[in-house]
Image (tube, grey):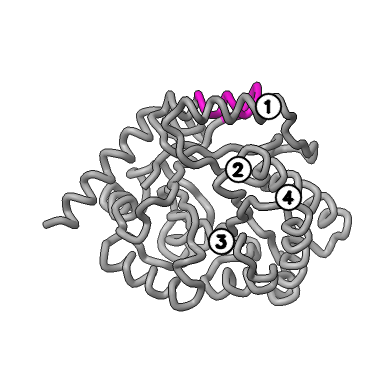
Amino acid sequence: MLVGAHVSPAGGPANAVGRGVERHSTAIQFFNQSPRAWRSRVYTDDEVAAFRSAVDDSPIEATLIHAVYLINCASTDRSLRKKSLTSLTNALLSGDAIGAHAVVLHAGSALAGQVGAAIKRAGKAIREALESSESCPLHLENTAGAGGTLGRSFEELAALLEAAGGGKRLGVCLDSCHLYASGYDIRTPKGLASVLDDYDAVVGLDRLGSLHLNDSQVGLGTNRDRHAVVGEGELGPNGCATFLSEPRFEELPCVLETGSRKPRSAPAVEDIDLAWKLRKQGLRRRAR
């Protein structure tokens, strides 16, 4: 497994590599544009060259670009869907340029509307973004299910993949907090194995491409997206160790998004070191 942090790309994407290395990461994730504005951008040739040089000289083996949270490919508002399409397309073009492992996307929300219609709208926008880019994979992230967000169940993820064309570039990013909050009990090896069996039957393990490790502030099936510091939420140290040592997750990039220094902070080196420690503990328990 490749373990790492969501980091800032301030000053250019090459700087994200350095911040990942400082945090003892072998995988990193960052936004390709400001997560609070629609100012879409694609990296310049100089930025791409600097990034690739930095990666070549580092232990980073996988880079994820997280598409911004403003995107709602399922919106009934045509203007918002157009902005979402532009932003997603530029994220994929940036992924093409830097050789990213994938772009991770929250597909959108049905809000109070019909889920089936929302999935069709999201699928259409995703297909258009993929057609306007070249090769970077796109991983649809599962959600906690609050506010009509799409992807709260494996069935919804499968429907989104189908609506988006079902091509080889499409995959899934599983978030531990979102799984738990949407009703999948992954706290024990047996529980996680059962959940992954269900995922395989509905979506297919061949579609699983990346992971987010976040603990949960809220209980099982509460459908609320509230990240907690790894080991300090409902999953706890044992649940996080279970997630980090799952055999079917081997070789996948697993990124921490929540840090421990202050609320809503990025992961620090201590957080990544703890994740590596929990992974070792989980592997030892599984070997008994």
Where does residue 34 sit, x and y in percent of width and height? Answer: 70, 35
Q: Residue at x 61, y 45 (%)?
A: 66
Magenta region: 8-18
Q: CA distance from mark 1 to mark 4?
A: 19 Å
Name the residue tied to disc 1.
Answer: 47
Name the residue tied to disc 3.
Answer: 171
Name the residue tied to disc 4.
Answer: 88
Label 4, secondary structure: give it: helix
Marks 1/4 in contact by CB < 8 Å: the verdict is: no
Name the residue tied to disc 2.
Answer: 65
Q: How dense is the environment of label 1, judged by Cα within 10 Å: few (below 14), some, or many (20 and up)? A: some
Left or right, 32 with reference to 182: right
Which amino acid does the dot numbered 3 rest on? Answer: Gly
Q: CA distance from mark 2 to mark 3?
A: 14 Å
Q: Quadrant of the C terminus?
A: bottom left
Q: CA distance from mark 2 to mark 4?
A: 11 Å
